[in-house]
Amino acid sequence: MMNLATSQTAKEPLLLAGKPVADALLASIAAAFEAFKRENPHIKTLPGLAVVQVGSNPASQVYVNKKAKVAKELGFHSEIHRLPVETTQADLLACLEALNADANIHGVLLQLPLPSHLSASQLQAVILPEKDVDGFHPHNLGLLLAGQNPFSIPCTPAGVMRLLAHYQLSVAGKHAVVVGRSNIVGKPMAQLLLQADATVTICHSKTPDIEAITRQADILVVAIGIPHWLKPSAVKPSAVVIDVGINRHPQTDKLVGDVDFEAVSPFCSAITPVPGGIGLMTIAELMHNTWQNFIKQN
């Protein structure tokens, strides 16, 4: 089969850097917080974010520390609850219920992945919907599916949509293909694109001839968790490529995405880098969700 991408003249794509977009969002949150304090001097409570981590996964440690750092830079109250890997389901449930009851906490985040003996779905359902800053609670996911306003929208899909809007990349009327069907990225990503008037296809591990579908995409969102999975042969010329993956390359140990950036970028119109793309947006959207929950609770 002819490689459609290589039949085109290589060109420099628009680099969809996440930093300017994330910085702008964080700056707007900081400004809104300052205005809130001036207008409500009687309220002394700070927006509060609690992150719960079980075990010592090195990648999770980095993400947790980064989230806490950004929260503190905004002037938020930030807590990290680090629990040993042998923590039981009952003990973790008790921790989450205590945070639900804590008036100083407006957002509760359970860091994934969890040790295999713990049920993430059961634990996420315990977090109050109004404190669910990940947007993973069935109540929030259900409202999103219904086209209503959840307390929080999952951070990574929300970040993708904000990034597209910042770079003035139209979604309406486009064919968007999402590779991946997780509750964290794939399903809510497809729903947000659909709400923005895209025609949406979801692909996954059981999709036959997946490249035949990804080559149809005007907007291609890849969240499959395999380093450098997407090659030029799977990309429509001039597509917008959004790489949600963050992986350690097995040979170099460098952070890479699900997209083979060097190979794909000459044949698409716009592409996100890894690192420096959607990961930064995810953290900024987490702060946005925390801020919104604080406002709703005050």
Image: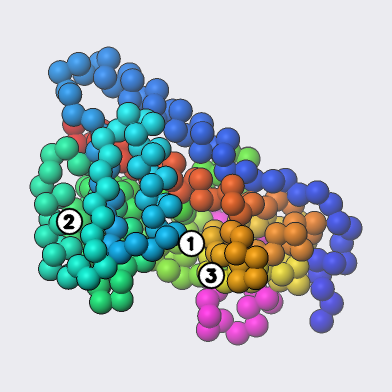
Mark carried by residue 224: 3
Judged left or right of residue 5, residue 127 is: left
Could you say whether the residue bearing mark 3 is in a helix, strand or loop? loop
Compared to residue 32, the image places residue 200 above or below, namely below
Return the x and y of residue 185 as percentages of the image width and height: 45, 61
Residue shown at 85%/67% (left/top)?
Answer: 6
Q: CA distance from mark 2 to mark 3?
A: 29 Å
Image point (51%, 31%), residue name: 24
Residue 54 at what x, y percent from top left? 28, 62
Classify residue 249 as left or right of residue 53. Answer: right
Q: Which residues are magenta?
A: 197-218
User: The disc labelled 2 sits on which kind of residue?
Assistant: Leu
Q: Give how far apart the Cα atoms at labels 2 and 1 are.
A: 29 Å
Q: Of label 2 and label 3, which has the lower sequence position?
A: 2
Q: Dot 1 corresponds to which residue?
A: 190
User: Is residue 162 positioned above or below 180 on the image?
Assistant: above
Q: What label does residue 96 carry, if any?
A: 2
> Where's residue 42, x and y in %?
15, 18
**Depth check: 71 or 165 in front?**
71
In front: label 2 or label 3 = 2
Q: Residues within 10 Å of mark 2 (few under 14, many from 20)?
A: many
Q: Is residue 293 visible?
A: no
Residue appearing at x 22%, y 71% in the figure = 86
